[in-house]
Image (spheres, rainbow, N blue to C red):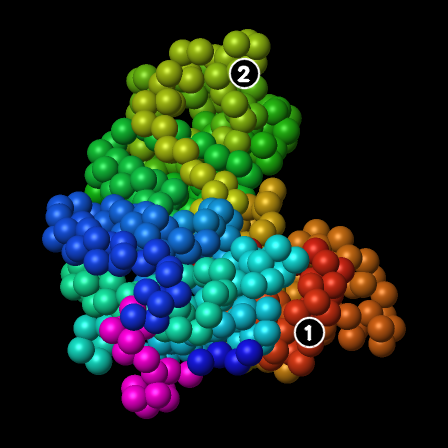
Amino acid sequence: MHPINLNEPATTRPTLAESLSFTCQLGECRSELLPLLSEVSKVVSGEGSLSKTLKLVLELMQKHLQVTRAMISLYDASCDQIFIHESFGLTKDEIEKGVYYPGEGITGKVVETRQPIIVPVIADEPLFLNRTGSWDKTVDCRLSFICVPIMRGMKVMGTIGVERLYNNRQLLYLDLEVLAIIATTIAQAVELHLLERAHKQVLQAQSARLDKELKEKFKPANIIGNSKAMQSVYRMIDKVSHARTTVLILGESGVGKERVASAIHYNSSCGGGPFVKFNCASLPESVIESELFGHEKGAFTGAAARRAGRFEEADGGTIFLDEVGELSLSAQAKLLRVIQERCFERLGSNESIKVNVRILAATHCDLTAMVAKGTFREDLFYRLNVFPITIPPLRERGNDILILAEHFNAWFAKEQQADVPAISTPALNLMLNYDWPGNVRELENMMERAVLLAEEGVIHSYHLPAALQPAVLGELGEQSGLEARLSMMEYELIVEALARFQGNMSRAAAQLGLTRRMLGLRMAKYQLNYKDYRCGD
Ligand SMILES: Nc1ncnc2c1ncn2[C@@H]1O[C@H](COP(=O)(O)OP(=O)(O)OP(=O)(O)O)[C@@H](O)[C@H]1O
């Protein structure tokens, strides 16, 4: 039995009255139709959200039409897709799977053509996609499917679709007419809901734009990234820059602590003064004090001339003490005095030198734990910890990974006097899924290498280090034969197709010229999951 294309002239279809009289002849108990329609109309004119209204309508359909499953789907013009809004007889998982493009399956066809469709026997109908996976051919072999559009004028806003046990053709027509009346009854409420949703989307876009403008306002020019996690860092920088307050910058290695320190300095009132960086871990303990505070001629063996220390160099500006957790206890005591009194003595001198220096310090160490262990002075900790700023690790910054990757891509291409290569979608996906233990520094180094390795203007996933690759690709990357190379290309093409169709495996498979099953097997080989490519996920 074939689907009934309701484009056929109305005269060949039985009217509602004819269908009703036919059902009466059949002795079918359909006298509930009028109460059903009147109850639906009451529900729709009542108060409440669209979801609540549609749920009640579905309940009425279940009760009066004895349908097995029913779904009301809405068309979202912003992404050109149709989603199940309310249903019964479907699990949460099945509802999530019920997404169609116009033209796709029965639901998509109804939206595209704005015409209802009856499928007398689902089992015989190739157009019925069973996208939700709810239809089980071993149990539901005699089910019919009826789908009608929800319209206002010529605008299609969604569909009502129901499955019911096949009885006879006339009854299907009767159900279709009833559903068409219900669709007309709920159309206004659906239109209102869609208008409200579109309005909300406009408001959200506006607020996102304002948010972005605000972000740009606070964002220091030398720091790339707009993630929420970095927004509070920018606000802190903005708040503290103009004060002379000591700032303690915390975060894992490579997160950008030095960048934040320079942003604070250059945005401060002493931004025109010197910015002196000193890495407390870079020198042996014996020379740290003379480096920081300077020395007199002859203060120790080899001190052939008097030398100013970093604190003197920073007078009128800022000193940035990186890796402050590495300072010895004796250097810590001297640093405490500089912070408290703003004065110190050069090694080998009794003369106190006063300086006007702002102190910024940074560490990846847990200073509280060090205080507890007695390896870091508690009083110094409190002096430094006046205004702590914690920089989040890169793995918590979401899309900043991509923004930074593009930034370094352009940067290194310029440095290597090469055209800026494109970064393939699979390569971007690998970056997003990686943990980045070395944070921004690791990403920066990786991009420098990838720009060099790029082929024909593209950075592919196999140009990234093995640590980022799924195990199977990592192994292939170590091989050099044709097979390994073909597999890498296959992986790239599959990921490109999944990304293009937002995880829709049927469409991806069609584009690749594979069956869905074949695509599934190859995705399993590369440990790919379609859910990772769904829109909004
Ligand atoms: N948001 C950012 N935008 C652009 N470049 C960044 C950003 N964050 C870090 N970088 C770059 O990453 C590298 C590491 O940054 P930085 O030296 O500031 O990190 P750090 O936290 O001070 O590291 P460490 O703890 O090892 O001293 C630098 O080359 C820096 O230029």
Q: Quadrant of residue 454?
A: bottom right
Instruction: Give the residues in magenta.
Output: 5-20
Q: Which residue is mark 1?
A: 515
Residue 370: mark in rendering: 2
Mark linked to residue 460? none
Question: Looking at the rendering, which quadrant does residue 356 occupy?
Answer: top left
Q: Nearer the viewer, residue 102 or 466?
A: 102
Q: Residue at x 14, y 51 (%)?
A: 42
Quarter of the image with the N terminus is bottom right
Find the distance from the CA under tag 1 to the CA under tag 2.
60 Å
Horizontal side of 269 relative to 265 (left or right) equals left
Q: Is residue 12 magenta?
A: yes
Residue 134 placement, left or right of 264: right
Residue 425 position within the rendered picture, expressed as x and y whole percent measured from the top left = 56, 68
Does 86 lie within the magenta span? Answer: no
Task: Please rate how many residues cluster around mark 2, counting C-alpha atoms within 10 Å: few if below 14, some from 14 to 19, many from 20.
Answer: some
- Disc 2, SS: helix
409, 260: nearer the viewer: 409
Q: Mark 2 near ligand 1 (CB under 8 Å)?
A: no
The residue shown at (50%, 53%) is: 94
Label 2 amino acid?
Met
- The kind of residue tagged 1 is Thr
Q: Is residue 244 visible?
A: yes
In the displayed structure image, the side of residue 219 where residue 521 appears, left or right? right
Q: Residues within 10 Å of mark 1 (few under 14, many from 20)?
A: some
- Residue at image coords 52%, 31%: 364
**Residue drawn at 35 percent across, 67 percent down:** 25
Q: Is residue 282 above or below residue 40?
A: above
Mark 1 CB near ligand 1 (8 Å cut): no
Q: Earlier in the sequence, mark 1 or mark 2?
A: 2
Give percent across and percent down for residue 536. Answer: 42, 57
